[in-house]
Amino acid sequence: MKPVRVSIETARSQEEVYDFLDVMANHQSFNDHFLVDWEYSGAERGVGSRARVRTRGGLGTDVIDIQVVSARAPAMIVEENIGANGRRRATGTYTLEERPGGGTRVVFEYAWRQAPLEERIAAPLVRAFVRRGTERAMQRLADRLAARRAADDRVDGR
């Protein structure tokens, strides 16, 4: 199946965005519209941090195990996702790029390495569901980062 790729831009620095995304528990705040019942294990941040979530809506429910398998501060975080009782394996990759003049472009790519037959048959529907959820998640991430910036500015008296 073709990967799904979505991006946003934020005024936050690459390091600030990376520090936020590096903490697995922060992902719940922008993904809980379609990933619910978050349980965390492993490291709090970085390689080895894990979450078990349940999907909601769209094409039914599933339990997905997410684990950060690679990280290169402040530019990239790679998660492995296992679902469908081990029949789906995918990677979710956050790539952070500095924008000219400040801020960061955040690109998220969800790429299937293995998918159950029923998902391959319904690939256009599956990709559309993942794209919608991911687009909303990335917009919510941008909103969370903007809110953090506004809070930081109030603390700094700006």
Image (cartoon, helix red, strand yellow):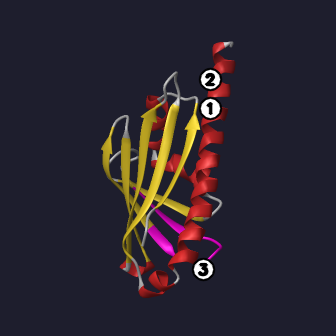
Tell me whether the residue at label 1 lies in contact with that at label 2, contact meaning CB atoms closer than 8 angstroms: yes
| Dot placed on the residue nearer the N-terminal end, 3 or 1 | 3
* Relative vertical location of residue 35 with respect to residue 142 in this rendering, above or below: below
Residue denoted by label 1: 148
| Picture residue at 37% right of the left edge, 80% below the top | 87
Q: Position of residue 136 (x, y in %)?
A: 64, 55
- What amino acid is at disc 1? Arg
- Per the rendering, the mark at residue 152 is 2
Residue denoted by label 3: 60
- State the quadrant of the C terminus: top right
| Picture residue at 38% right of the left edge, 56% below the top | 79
| Picture residue at 45% right of the left edge, 82% below the top | 120
Is disc 1 placed on a helix, strand or loop?
helix
Q: In this view of the protein, which residue sits in the foreground, 114 or 54?
A: 114
User: Which quadrant would residue 90 be assigned to in this image?
Assistant: bottom left
Which residues are drawn in magenta? 50-64
Tell me whether the residue at label 3 lies in contact with that at label 1, contact meaning CB atoms closer than 8 angstroms: no
* Relative vertical location of residue 81 with respect to residue 152 in this rendering, above or below: below
Q: In this view of the protein, which residue sits in the foreground, 37 or 119?
A: 119
Is disc 3 placed on a helix, strand or loop?
loop
